[in-house]
Amino acid sequence: MEVHHLVLRGTNREIGRQLATMAVERHGVTPASGGDPLITRARRRWYRSEWPAHFERMRGVADVHGVAVDDDSVELGLLAYLGAPAPACSVAWLPDSSTLSRNYDFPTGTLTEILGGNAQPGELPMTARPYVIETRPSDGGPACLFLCAYELLGGCIDGVNSEGLVVALLADDETVDRDPTLAPAVGVNEIQLLRYVLETCASTGEAREALLSAKQHYMFLPCHFLVADVGGDSFVWERTANAEHLVEGRGEVQVVTNHLLHGRPSLDDLPAGDGPSATYARARRLTGALAGRSGLSPDDIKAAHSCVHRDDAGSPVRTLWHGLYDAVDRSLEISFYLGEDPAGGVRRSPYVRFGL
């Protein structure tokens, strides 16, 4: 894994230019050909009215590639690199310390391998090039610090903004009846949703309203999302085929893995067994490691969350990073997976701190 730290300043249009230039130079990514012109126009209209910061970044992409922002023949709303299905992870929100502890778990293979084929020459593992990004727009909106993978222009896997709002994405590995778009659609997809929240909301109260009113879809796999703020409030956002759900944290420790929480007020309501991707087992284990403990230090939280690190031999899945977001300090302390240790186990980087 090779991690880059980007600090992007200027107007959102200028930030869009910087990202579009980097996408070409580092990843060979240019805007894709547009699909249905009606969908392209509707997407652009939604961004312009509901997420103007992203629309301004689209202007920057158009500038770099010499096209008009209203050109229906190109897709300017995404800069996808190594397009990915959603991850499997674990998250814990600890309200007494306003800390979000996050494991990001994902296979170490290439996209071709994950889809069942043989790796192509020169093909990188899916998450070989994540970014720690800071955006500091000069034309309004909060500064944001977040992890980005797979989509540069509007993507976010987890993050914090300058208002003390923290967010994290987790896959829903339980839902069987799936209908992904597999193409751009109107509104925000699963990778964009949290960036939208960070850039438009200052609190969990505002985030609830924004999510209930936003048009959403998923391109690959359904996800659910934890949102919390510096005041200690938290909730998990979930969507099913015909309903939207707010699972409230109620000022208590909130643990989330890869199964839906609505309608299940306690771990006792889960089916017996480990569940898909061991999601039930990880929820029980992490809850047990945190239960009844208050005033935990960052080192205590790291030790507790390590009980669900994915480093078991024979599995292609690894905890690619563990991060601690401090909503008070607006900071991130994070350790990355570096590879397999010849002596056994895995190698991880020391924790590195970033702050707004």
Image (cartoon, helix red, strand yellow):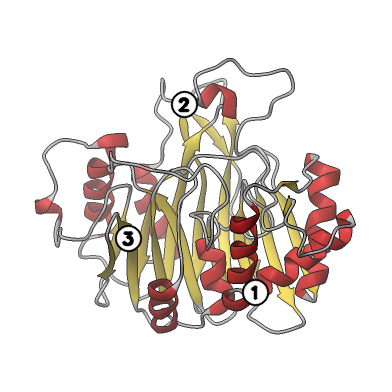
Look at label 3 and name its amino acid.
Answer: Glu
Query: What quarter of the picture does the C terminus occupy?
Result: bottom right
Where's residue 227, x and y in %? 41, 69
Residue closest to the eye, 176 or 334:
176
Q: Are marks 1 and 3 in contact (CB under 8 Å)?
A: no
Q: Is residue 98 visible?
A: no
> SS for tag 2?
loop
Of circles 1 and 3, the one toward us is 1
Disc assigned to residue 316: 2
Label 1: element kind: helix
Q: Is residue 4 above or below residue 128?
A: below
Residue to which mark 3 is pinned? 238
Relative side of 219 to 278, left or right: right
Q: Which quadrant would the N terminus be assigned to in this image?
A: top right
Q: Position of residue 255 (x, y in %)?
A: 29, 59
Crowd class of label 3 (few under 14; some 14 to 19; many from 20; radius 10 Å): many
